[in-house]
Amino acid sequence: MSERVISRIGVVTALAALVAAAGCAGGGEHGVAGARKTLVHRCAAGAVRAVGSADIAWAAVVERPLTAFRSPGRGAIARFGLVNVNGAPNVLGILGERVDTRCRATWLHVALPVRPNGSTGWVRARNVQRASVHTRITVDLSERRVRLYRSGKLVLSSRAAVGSSATPTPLGRYYVNQRLIPDD
């Protein structure tokens, strides 16, 4: 089954991200028998973990001009300001995060709105505002069906036209970084 995933954030839309994974490990009990259980988080500086789930994704809204890198701090790819060429806020879909020893994100692995489609890079977490995204769209080419989900619940299902062998429907994960609404 081939799916295209698109997630929406207010006026702006962002990528449905990967399933949450390791990075912080849970601890166990501390103290004497019968004492209250305390959860201890341990993170290794530089650990990378995926973010999001089937019900929630994360978007990075650019708050300060930033540079996207091939790896954290190395190999600049592109620069982004607060707004894009259409005057809409610059939004990047968050795929993962690199954390410090306190489990705080220092770098974010993001989908980039540049060619070729599917380009990713790393941006400093302090330069963006993170926002949760609870809406996604899946496109199943074999069923010729588009489905809209909110908070993991199916809201709408509809038949859809798909491309031909001469002009195939592109496969993969995508995110929309702006919604343009004409005045008329």
Image: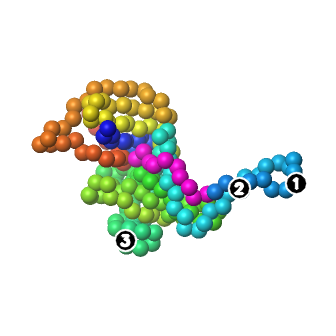
| Percent of width and height locating residue 118 | 32, 54
Residue flagged by tag 1: what amino acid is it? Answer: Val
* Foreground tag (2 vs 3): 2
Q: Residue at x 22, y 31 (%)?
A: 161
Reading the image, the residue beneath label 3 is 76
Q: Nearer the viewer, residue 81 or 129?
A: 129
> Range of the magenta residues?
15-24
Cα distance, mark 1 to mark 2? 15 Å
Quadrant for the N terminus in the image? top left
Comes first in the chain, label 1 or label 2? 2
| Percent of width and height locating residue 109 | 44, 59
Comes first in the chain, label 2 or label 3? 2
Category of crowding for the residue at label 3, using alpha-carbon neighbours closer than 10 angstroms: few (below 14), some (14–19), many (at least 20): some
Q: Is residue 141 left or right of residue 147?
A: left
Colouring method of the image: rainbow
Q: Residue at x 14, y 41 (%)?
A: 165
Q: Is residue 181 above or below residue 82?
A: above
Q: Nearer the viewer, residue 139 or 81?
A: 139
Q: Nearer the viewer, residue 25 or 128?
A: 25
Which numbered disc covers residue 27? 2
Residue flagged by tag 2: what amino acid is it? Answer: Gly
Q: Nearer the viewer, residue 79 or 110?
A: 110
| Residue 21 seen in render | yes
